[in-house]
Image: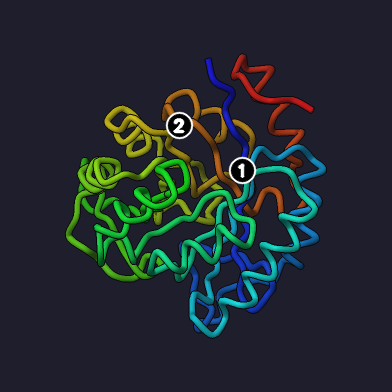
Amino acid sequence: MLAKRVIPCLDVHDRQVTRGVKFGLAEKGQLRNVGDPVALALEYNRQGADEMVFYDITASAHGRGTMVEVIEQVASQCFMPLTVGGGIRTVEDMNTMLHAGADKVSINSSALATPELIHAGAEKFGSQCIVVSIDAKRVAPDRWEVFSHGGRKPTGLEAVAWAERAVSLGAGEIVLNSIDADGTKAGYDLEITRHISERVGVPVVASGGAGKLEHLAEVLERGKADAVLAASIFHFGEFTVGDVKQFLAQRGIPVRLL
């Protein structure tokens, strides 16, 4: 069985790592500064993180240079794979981030607006470089809708169907973000994670809701995720990556230990 991955996530706004609740927006003053992204990435690398995800929540052409600098600095000092997302709208944007040192690029709203971007990126760089991030919100007992623009705009798309289409277009990985659970620390959405994990043939990374070690184990076991992404529990010192891996290993979940 392949080892499950533990992935810290850094939301970067104006070169600071921030944290919100349920997709809190910078313009509403709902974000809390956490620290410098390069320093945090180096610390998580030291702790044994399997990968690192950076989301540029400034997500504008004006701020692109700042994120490129962050990725270049981290890539020059860390040996774990790096994924970067936010504001990536073209194949040229993908190339910029991959050239800066990212191993994968994550697309969300741009993939919804132009699904062909998934195929174009996979054709040029390989499916292993293309991650499609899905922000899903439960809208009925057994239905989850995809939202775009940082969880603000409903698309009318059903989450499982969109995940299947994204993979058919060439996505090599799905990051599933639960809007309902994000930042609440009340646990991942196990149902939608399991539904998508059972229907797509690529790794699914669970995101949104980690508050205690049991939550990460549950989404890997019952949610059938291939990896867990978390932010708050790491940023505020509640647990280290090593704490998570030791707990998972004790549960019989295969992980890569230092």
Residue 141 in sight from this viewpoint: no
Name the disc covering residue 204, or none: none
| Picture layout, residue 65 above or below residue 70 | below
Q: Is residue 53 left or right of residue 196?
A: right
Give the side of residue 114 with respect to residue 127, left or right: left
| Label 1 or label 2, whichever comes before in sequence order | 1
The answer to which quarter of the image holds residue 65 is bottom right
Q: Residue visible at 57% across and 80% down?
A: 63
Q: Position of residue 1 (x, y in %)?
A: 53, 15
Q: Is residue 187 above or below residue 256?
A: below
Mark 1 surroundings: few (<14), some (14-19) or many (≥20) residues within 10 A: many
Please say whether residue 100 is visible from this viewpoint: yes
Q: Residue lying at the far left in this picture: please name it.
A: 156
Please give the residue where the numbered disc 2 appears in the rendered image: 225
> Considering the numbered disc 2 on the image, is that residue within a helix, a strand or a loop?
loop
Residue 146 position in % (x across, y down): 27, 56
Residue type, mark 1 in image: Ile
Question: Residue, x 31% and y 59% (percent of image)?
Answer: 117
**Is 32 left or right of 121, judged from the image as shown?**
right
Look at the picture and state if 195 lies above or below 31: above
Amino acid at circle 2 = Ala
Relative to 97, residue 81 above or below? above
Secondary structure of the residue carrying tag 1 is: strand
Q: Quadrant of residue 244?
A: top right
Q: Which residue is mark 1?
A: 7
> Quick one: quadrant of the C terminus?
top right
Percent of width and height locating residue 187:
50, 42
Q: In this view of the protein, which residue sits in the foreground, 89 or 248?
A: 89
